Amino acid sequence: MAQETHDTLTLLREQVARLERPPIAPHVSETLPTGTPAIDAHLGGGLRRGSVHEIVGTGADHATGVRPTRFVASILARATGRIVWVRGVGTDLCLAGLRQLGLSPGRLILVETTPEQVAALAEDILRERGICAMVADITAPMTLTATRRLQLAAEKSGATGFLIHQAKADGRRGKPPPLPASACQTRWRVGAAPCVLPFSPSYRTPLPGPARWQVDLLRQRGGPAASWTLEISDDDATLPLRLASPLADRSMASPTPRHLHLVRSGSAGA
């Protein structure tokens, strides 16, 4: 097992060496903007680099991780540099979808391993210099000790880590068990929110309104929690996740590609 991990890291180092970007300039921001002004303002500019961020889903997204994955991909599409994406056997990643979000598959180094080895491999990757971020699909929440090790590794290398939960809900209760304590810089919950049926005299039957997301910042180190409801515009068939102005300004804005609009913000509940 140790030899397998060593061989994997050797291959990763070779790929990073061939594709390595220039060193980060001193003036580069210490945060990764999400693209939503309200969220970035609350975070002080965006997600802190050189830290680990945890994202969980709700409902079907708790098992599939579709919206959490899209949330992370849209953030990384705004950054530069190589990304190592670690997946356990059985998970899936749509490269065409990532490309539509603006994240070039050419920036990705995909690593597939067993679910049991994701945590250890993620830590080793975060210790490597020369990458922008490490994303790990995990099937169960990591322990406080494991997330502390990841956080220390990220702080030392400057790489940013993302943990995306892809686990089944408890069949007896219909929802996942409570999340354990974590040393991650932030913990998010991203999932679907009820859409609004727009009223129009020309419609006999109301059509579903734009899809909505519920984005909750459950906790952040040194800052308060918060909650936002975002709306996706279907004005375009493409899927770039560029975030637009608040919903109140939409009537004055020209049609835009499939964007997220801020509907409302508030306090998040764990």
Image (cartoon, rainbow, N blue to C red):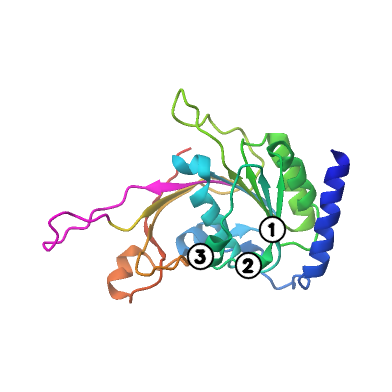
Residue 14: percent from the left, percent from the top?
A: 84, 62
Residue 33: percent from the left, percent from the top?
A: 56, 64
Label 1 belongs to which residue? 133
Contact flag, marks 2 and 1 (Cβ < 8 Å) = yes
The kind of residue on which mark 3 rests is Gly
The N terminus, quarter of image: top right
Residue 203: percent from the left, percent from the top?
A: 14, 60
Q: Give the magenta-colored segment's residue range.
A: 187-208
Label 3 environment density (alpha carbons within 10 Å; few <14, some 14–19, many ≥20): some
Report the residue that reaches farthest toward the top. Answer: 172
Distance from the alpha carbon under mark 1 to that under mark 3: 17 Å
Dot 1: element: strand
Dot 3: element: loop
Query: Which badge, 1 or 3, comes first in the chain's sequence?
Result: 3
Distance from the alpha carbon under mark 2 to that under mark 1: 9 Å
Query: Which badge, 2 or 3, comes first in the chain's sequence?
Result: 3
Label 2 belongs to which residue? 79
Label 3 belongs to which residue? 35
Residue at (83%, 45%) from the top-left corner? Answer: 5
The kind of residue on which mark 2 rests is Ala
Residue at (45%, 44%) from the top-left corner? Answer: 268
Contact flag, marks 1 and 3 (Cβ < 8 Å) = no
Which residue occupies the foreground of this view, 68 or 222? 68
Label 1 environment density (alpha carbons within 10 Å; few <14, some 14–19, many ≥20): many
Residue at (78%, 71%) from the top-left corner? Answer: 23
Main SS type for the magenta part? loop
Report the residue that reaches farthest toward the bottom. Answer: 254
Contact flag, marks 2 and 3 (Cβ < 8 Å) = no
Q: Would you place residue 226 above or below residue 17 in this image?
A: above
Whether residue 200 appears in magenta in the rendering, the answer is yes
